[in-house]
Image (spheres, rainbow, N blue to C red):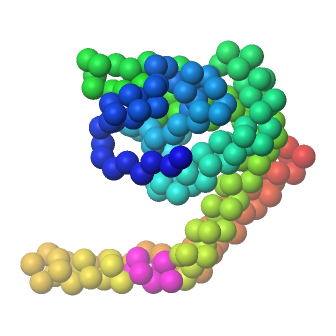
Amino acid sequence: VVFKLLGFTGAWEVDRLLAVKEMTGFWVGNDFRRYLNAEAIGVNANNFSGTSFSPGVRGWVQTAAHFFWYPKDFKGVQDSGMLPSHKAEPDEDRPAYVLDARMATGAMMVLGSCAPALGETMGTFPLLKHWKQWECHPMKLFVQQCKDEWDEYARTWKENGAPGPVPAYPYTPEMVQGYLDEEQQDYDALLRRIG
């Protein structure tokens, strides 16, 4: 069953409907068959891995599916005792199913280490994210759009009496390509080091 819920406050009706007393990681009552995930509240400043919803959803779906397909893997996760748990906090108006960002991030880290096959699969996601980013936002087009926006602000500032000349946009596609090449070299070196 998939629920699409909108809003910034957890709905107590979800806890009631699904009989949620306690969440262990993303599972109601520590039962691998009862996966329940809502976008975590807050921000975990130790892990800025993205700013959009879809990469997280990809991982959540993979996580739920993995344990449906390989339920014995969940035993290792349970035996670790490392999954965070959460009960309802009525004084904070926070149902049990609503995890904060730190708890959700911690749960994902535990899952990747206690279920190695899941961790291996999830390890491919950053590369997929990288490819999709460049497919949707080609570098030259992105740099041109940044320059166009810079120039638009410059025109507005001049029209409103900004003193002195407006500096030219500081990046060219060639410069950005150089930065990307350097990043790729660093990444390749990292892969060689870790084998």
Residue 190 seen in the current view: yes
Q: Quadrant of residue 157?
A: bottom left
Find residue 141 and report its horizontal and vertical position in percent: 50, 83
Relative to 179, 67 lies left or right: right
Frontmost residue, 189 versus 40 = 40
Q: What residue appears at the point 33 percent right and 79 percent down from the top-left corner?
A: 149
Relative to 29, 191 lies left or right: right
Find residue 70 and report its horizontal and vertical position in percent: 80, 38
Q: Is residue 102 above or below residue 151?
A: above
Q: Is residue 184 above or below residue 145?
A: above
Find residue 144 and report its horizontal and vertical position in percent: 45, 83
Relative to 96, 27 lies left or right: right
Frontmost residue, 28 versus 184 = 28
For residue 142: magenta?
yes
Residue 175 seen in the current view: no
Q: What residue appears at the point 87 percent right and 51 percent down from the top-left corner?
A: 192
Frontmost residue, 17 versus 147 = 17
For residue 131: magenta?
no
Q: Residue furthest left?
A: 161
Frontmost residue, 34 versus 172 = 34
Q: What residue appears at the point 61 percent right and 53 percent down from the top-left corner?
A: 58
Q: Which residues are magenta?
A: 141-147
Find residue 54 and report its horizontal and vertical position in percent: 52, 57
Q: Quadrant of residue 168?
A: bottom left
